Image (tube, rainbow, N blue to C red):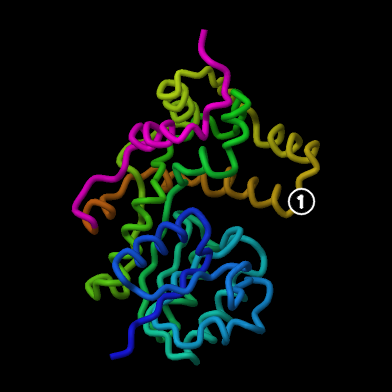
Amino acid sequence: MKKEQFLITGGTGKTGRRIVDRLQKLGHAVRIGSRSAQPSFDWNRPHNWPEVVKGIDYIYITYQPDLAVPGAKEAIAELVRVSKNAGVKKLVLLSGKGEREAELCEEIVINSGIDYTIVRASWFNQNFSENFLLDSILDGVVALPQAHVKIPFVDANDIADVVVEVFLNDAHSQKIYELTGNELLTFKEAVDTISEVTEHDITFIPVSLEEYSNAMREMQLPEDFIWLIDYLFEVVLGNPENSIITNDIENILGKKPISFMAYAQEVSKTNIWKNTAVKA
């Protein structure tokens, strides 16, 4: 009997590498979709996607940097076309909670004729430890807009567990899930939690979106990156629906979501945050 094959795009990223690890531990054959893999998977090089997808049964799709950016819809449509031609059995799309542009990409997957599950996720806990906000945490000063917004941060480990479950259980076919944590925190409350568990001083400074954008330009960050961050803060965080807690993780996995405190306690053991100033 042929062993079923999984392709995990973004297979070295926050959710992807966790999914790869879980599937491999369960004995499944996994192809990592990344630019460094062989065959290489690059969202900007669709000409070799047929080679990457050949022989694949299941695909996890996570688009970089975000489904909201120009060109994402076209890329998703092309990957879906290639997947259908290759006889792929199921697609699992990681989508953004409360993003209209992401929903347009979801519709492409839903209407593909391939079995699917859509996984919409809130902001990741791991943004504080694996990219984006890590440098600010290490500097001991985090300045962010939308300081008043309550966010149901979700853990990448819960997302990975859900993705593996929906791949392996047909009960989740043609479903859309929204994954959140089980508590609402502002950025300041999240930063204060990290400060508490690490016993390091970390100051949170609320700023306007305009001030934040100007600071990114002073750092000479690319304009397309600045546009994306502006979009995420203004449109996504500005959507009241994104402050709604769901029960999907508990319903799918039979356990409560990982809390931000539990996440922070685990990360603090790794010493990733060890360079922050020690509290007096």
Give the residue drawn at x 72%, y 54%.
224
The percent position of residue 166, horizontal first and vertical second, equals: 30, 68
| Residue sitting nearer the eye, 265 or 79 | 265
128 horizontally vs 132: left or right: left
The percent position of residue 184, horizontal first and vertical second, equals: 37, 36
Residue, disc 1: 223
Q: Where 122 sits versus 134, above or below? A: below
Disc 1 crowd, CA 10 A, few/some/many (<14, 14-19, 20+): few
Q: Where 212 sits versus 40, above or below? A: above
101 horizontally vs 110: left or right: right
From which residue to which does the magenta span run? 253-280
Number of numbered discs on residues? 1
87 horizontally vs 75: left or right: left
Q: In which quarter of the image is residue 2?
A: bottom left
Q: Does the magenta stretch include residue 258?
A: yes
Give the residue type at disc 1.
Glu
The percent position of residue 41, horizontal first and vertical second, equals: 60, 73
Give the residue drawn at x 61%, y 74%.
40
Q: Is the magenta stretch mostly helix, strand or loop?
A: loop
Q: Which residue appears farthest toward the left when viewing the image?
A: 254
